[in-house]
Image (cartoon, coloured by chain):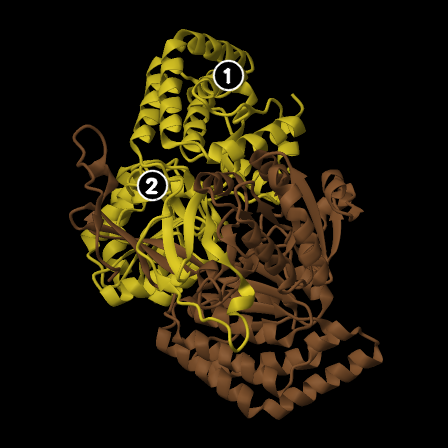
Chain colours: A brown, B yellow
Amino acid sequence: MDIHKLASQCKSAAIDMSALSSQIKDTALQNIIQSLKGSINLIIESNESDLEHAQRDHLDAPLLKRLKFDHAKILEACEGIASLIKLEDPVGKTICATQLDKGLELFKVSRPIGVIGVIFESRPDALVQIAALCLKSGNAVLLKGGSEASATNQILASLISRAGIESGLPDGWLGLLETRSDVDQMLKLETAVDLIIPRGSNAFVRYIMDNTVIPVLGHADGICHLYIDRFSDHKMAIDLSIDSKCQYVAVCNAIESILVHEAVAQDVLPTLKTKLEEKGVKIFGCNKTCAIVEVDAASAEDWKTEYLDYIVSIKVVRTLKEAIGHINCYGSGHTDVIVTQDKKRAIDFMDHVDTADAFWNCSSRFADGFRFGLGAEVGISTNKIHARGPVGLEGLMIYQWRLIGNGQMVKDYTGETGKPFTHKSLNKDFC
Amino acid sequence: MDIHKLASQCKSAAIDMSALSSQIKDTALQNIIQSLKGSINLIIESNESDLEHAQRDHLDAPLLKRLKFDHAKILEACEGIASLIKLEDPVGKTICATQLDKGLELFKVSRPIGVIGVIFESRPDALVQIAALCLKSGNAVLLKGGSEASATNQILASLISRAGIESGLPDGWLGLLETRSDVDQMLKLETAVDLIIPRGSNAFVRYIMDNTVIPVLGHADGICHLYIDRFSDHKMAIDLSIDSKCQYVAVCNAIESILVHEAVAQDVLPTLKTKLEEKGVKIFGCNKTCAIVEVDAASAEDWKTEYLDYIVSIKVVRTLKEAIGHINCYGSGHTDVIVTQDKKRAIDFMDHVDTADAFWNCSSRFADGFRFGLGAEVGISTNKIHARGPVGLEGLMIYQWRLIGNGQMVKDYTGETGKPFTHKSLNKDFC
């Protein structure tokens, strides 16, 4: 189908999606689970066909692994949907209420954003998860998966879309884009698409961000730091460095740089080096680091590199202020940690580091929607507006102002003899 | 000064601005008031020089009126700042708190966005107001005013910037751009500027929105509707139509179109026409309207026109659904009103009209930050993310996640023997 027609259908469906009852949405999610489970062999067959093509095209092993959507992964995706059903409906919540005057009441009510455009690489489970998140939050969705997963994506989109429509969702609530050129066209549809969520490699997300004026929820880089303060517990500092770097190196919330206060460098660096190297971590150090421990010298490039690997850069800093300056210069505003026993310095760090997640005496790896208890994770954002850090369903929400009166006119509240506003906070929900 | 240097100074100042105490910020606002009042003659002289140039250049009367910044307007601007001092500091509020585990506590804390780029036409009072709003909310600001007001803007920016710095604000917290080409350069500085707020004509705001990838807070159009339902109180419907259209025609929250349910058109339209014409309003009607009352026929263009004048278009609709469809098609998502005695239909309207302000039985003209009781108005937004409708100081805010532990590592919460998260909501503030 023509992308403009698809988007226009989706935009129109978004209106009806936003007004659905919680019951219809949860029934639809339940029916989607049943539909996926009922067609599990069909899904696996389609996925095997994608895998065959991918092998023939010599795709590399990590990509093949992400592409694979087997029995276990399908059931896991269904469990994800089941957990969404248990969450409260985020639509229609009264955020605040104010009496403007007697009989004139203002409500700020949560509403879905509208049409969410989701673009992801290979992983078919992303399609299932994001479609379910959009449904639960009353949004319509345009999806584009990796071409290597096209057969899997087609069967999944078709099953999910149909199960939704049969449960009372509007036609067009889920649209699947087929080609790369569809994506480029979607990125230009700023009147139809309200928010883009890209899922994939950094380069991929950067490409999306650079090629659309539609708001993008996501992060292109995760250059995270851990700063070991002069007043830190050294054992804790080293343990947290290891966990933040090595617990899982290929993720955005793993640290790439460790900053060490010069007053404790002599004491901390030798053990830190030993423990990191025990884990197989390659270290690049600044001049001062190299003067204390035998490691390779870091280049200017190292401070701005997201290794996503068993590699770390270490820099000795003279002051807390220098650490903050370094992070604000080279960090990506994702997650940054201070290890210190001094509360004032910890707060100073959090107040001055311009980052989504400012952590004190704990691992950077906690920066995650599930660990934060958000119930579901839409993504992690390094945006400075709307949503920042791990984003739950509320990232797919906006609000509407609803003013209820009985004929009030502004002319009666204007001028010297005009009625005053009461502006009294109300402790009640909309309708 | 070179715009890149100015922006880089401002970005660096934003870090310090975000960490200022409420006391320093409020003292700075107080000192700005004193500085403006102390230099009132200097300001008026500069403004008179701008006015002379403008008259020589034959600028039209409304523009000259906006440009004028006399004694009364200066004092009014100072009163605006004084009212800001009384508002609560929006920075550092704990939005929510969650225990992830014993001794591992997560806080979502309100923070300033960073660098706000403000571009406005003529009105010098806008400079004073927006600088004060940014200061109160801990943001740094880059300002560009109309070239016709350059002398006034220069003296205002210089007084405000200096009074701020003397009160403890960082150098560069307020930067003034001088030329139009500076603006075009600023629109490209997506790494330095976090949010753009344009103030001016629709065409001006549209230009800004079309020429930057930086998020823009504002609205290009205010195509607002009032729908008279079949179950409406006709007198109320006509009164609200007059107030919504005529109370002040040149503003974005005045209505441009009235939709009338066909079941009441025969009864409502003659009186509506008389009352509108008494106010000097020119009416363009659809075919059905023209069949009932003698008015000029509307063209297709009328439904998408923001007249901002004593002109209105009227359309007879067969159903509530048709009214909703018309508004979603032609409206600008700003403010739309239903007049009805039927609560179910009112909620149906609010649930389905994709607009920032959905009003029931009251005038569209209430869509305003001061009338809403927001304390201060940053602007009105038709965005679908971050902030929508009248925006108070919270539109200049984002949040930071702060996780406080005592050495917790993710490895201990991972795998089958991993500790569980408690995810307990905490009723406490950060630190």
Q: Vertically, is B54 above or below A189? A: above
Q: Vertically, is A259 above or below A80? A: above
Quadrant of the image containing the N terminus of chain A = bottom right
The residue drawn where x is 65% and y is 51% is A223
Which of B225 and B262 lies nearest the eye of the viewer?
Answer: B225
Q: Residues within 10 Å of mark 2 (few under 14, many from 20)?
A: many
Quadrant of the image containing the C terminus of chain A = bottom left
Residue designated by label 2: B368
Quick check: A369 left or right of B339? right
Looking at the picture, how far across and down is residue A218, in whole percent?
Answer: 59, 57
Looking at the picture, how far across and down is residue B205, in whole percent?
Answer: 53, 38
Looking at the picture, how far across and down is residue B292, in whole percent?
Answer: 31, 56
Q: Type of residue at label 2?
A: Asp
Q: Type of residue at label 1?
A: Ser
Chain that bears disc 1: B
Marker disc for residue A126: none
The residue drawn where x is 26% and y is 67% is B344
- Tell me how many marks there are: 2
For numbered disc 2, what is the local secondary structure?
loop
* Residue B290 visible in rendering: no
- Give the number of the mark in front: 2 or 1: 1
The residue drawn where x is 48% and y is 17% is B162
Quick check: A419 left or right of B253? left
Quick check: B52 left or right of B245? right
Marker disc for residue B158: 1
Chain that bears disc 2: B
For numbered disc 1, what is the local secondary structure?
helix
